[in-house]
Amino acid sequence: MAERSRASSAHISPSAHYTGYVWYRHQLADPAFVTRFGRWAHGLLRPITWGARVGFGLDLDSLLLQRHLLIDARLTQAIEHEGVEQVVEIACGLSPRGRRFTARYPQLRYLEADLPQMAARKRLLLQGQGWLNGQHQVKNVDILAAQGTGSLASLFADLDPTRPVLVITEGLVNYFELAVIEGFWSRLAAQLQRFPQATYLTELYPDLQEHPRYRQLRWGVELVGRLTRGHYPLHYRDAETIAAGFARCGFAHTEVLDPGQQAAALGLPVLRQASLVRVIEARV
Ligand SMILES: C[S@@+](CC[C@H](N)C(=O)[O-])C[C@H]1O[C@@H](n2cnc3c(N)ncnc32)[C@H](O)[C@@H]1O
């Protein structure tokens, strides 16, 4: 099962080089996180992202920053005010968040996890800079593996079940059909039940058909699908269907956050309309 699912989602991994370069461009990452492929891909797509910004008002970097900074803000809140001491970032790719947060909060246990090849690359990167230690580690995981090596159960076995935990996925869920990602969320909720307090943060691109930029969004997701040789399905229509979906998977409380409403607090340009992305904060 794990072998088959690895083969079916490995095509997503190159996109992590692109976003890694975006985080670097916006002073969120050290130069060590930049890969040759990420820089090249960003340069190659620049005319398209420029055209989308000028022609359609769709700014890819700002959409990415909205999700990244809002997840950072919620994580900060959880660490500083809700006693979170253990963080698991699944599908970490080349994100610098683990480095930034462990530098700021040295007491934090921070597990980064990804498919084996990407995890090996990230481990090498962090190790090379002397940034890994007993508290901050990189593990293998395949969100599609129901059991065995690479499953959520083996990843969570490394945590202290008597302490609060917070799990993050970013740039992952819309690469999968809803039934597949709901399967992952159900397995995740089952793991989180073991902790006294557990929070899951993710971003999600809903199917906001009434949004003034909906046509441009469809164009954008079509492009992402083609570039990553897969699909990029939009999930749920609104906050109510999102909360209902998460409830079906075992999350009792779900908040749906619009980064557009917090743009100023996140240090981003204020938007004239709701964002196209949502950050979900779900608790079991
Ligand atoms: C768009 S990148 C996002 C990386 C990072 N979170 C960020 O926002 O920069 C998607 C990530 O999902 C990972 N991924 C794809 N399929 C996966 C799976 N089945 N299990 C775990 N991670 C997976 C890829 O390897 C890649 O690192």
Image: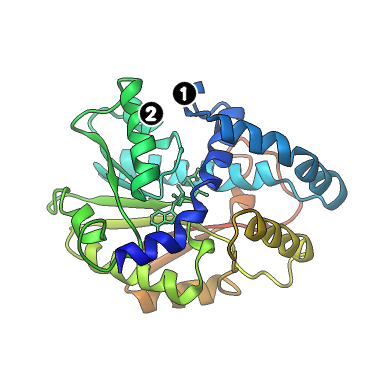
Total labels: the figure holds 2
Q: Is residue 56 left or right of residue 153?
A: right
Nearer to me, 258 or 54:
54
Q: Position of residue 27 (x, y in %)?
A: 56, 26
* Rendered location of residue 80, percent (x, y): 32, 38
- Mark 1 — residue? 32
Q: CA distance from mark 1 to mark 2?
A: 7 Å
Figure quadrant of the N terminus: bottom left
Q: Residues within 10 Å of mark 1 (few under 14, many from 20)?
A: few
Picture quadrant of residue 133? top left
Tell me which colouring the rendered structure shows.
rainbow
Relative to 31, is 100 on the left or the right? left
> Is 256 placed left or right of 169 in the picture?
right
Q: Quadrant of residue 247?
A: bottom left
Q: Quadrant of residue 207?
A: bottom right
Q: Please tell me whether residue 153 is drawn above or below residue 252 in the rendered image.
A: above
Check disc 2 and report the residue beneath it.
Answer: 125
Asked whether the residues under the numbered discs 1 and 2 touch, taking CB atoms below 8 Å apart as contact, a structural biologist would say yes
Three-letter code, disc 2: Leu
Residue shown at the point (61%, 35%) measured from the top left: 267
The kind of residue on which mark 1 rests is Ala
Q: Circle 2 sits in a helix, a strand or a loop, which is it?
A: helix
**What residue is shown at x 66% (from left), y 43% (from top)?**
62
Tell me, yes or no, if residue 153 can be seen here: yes
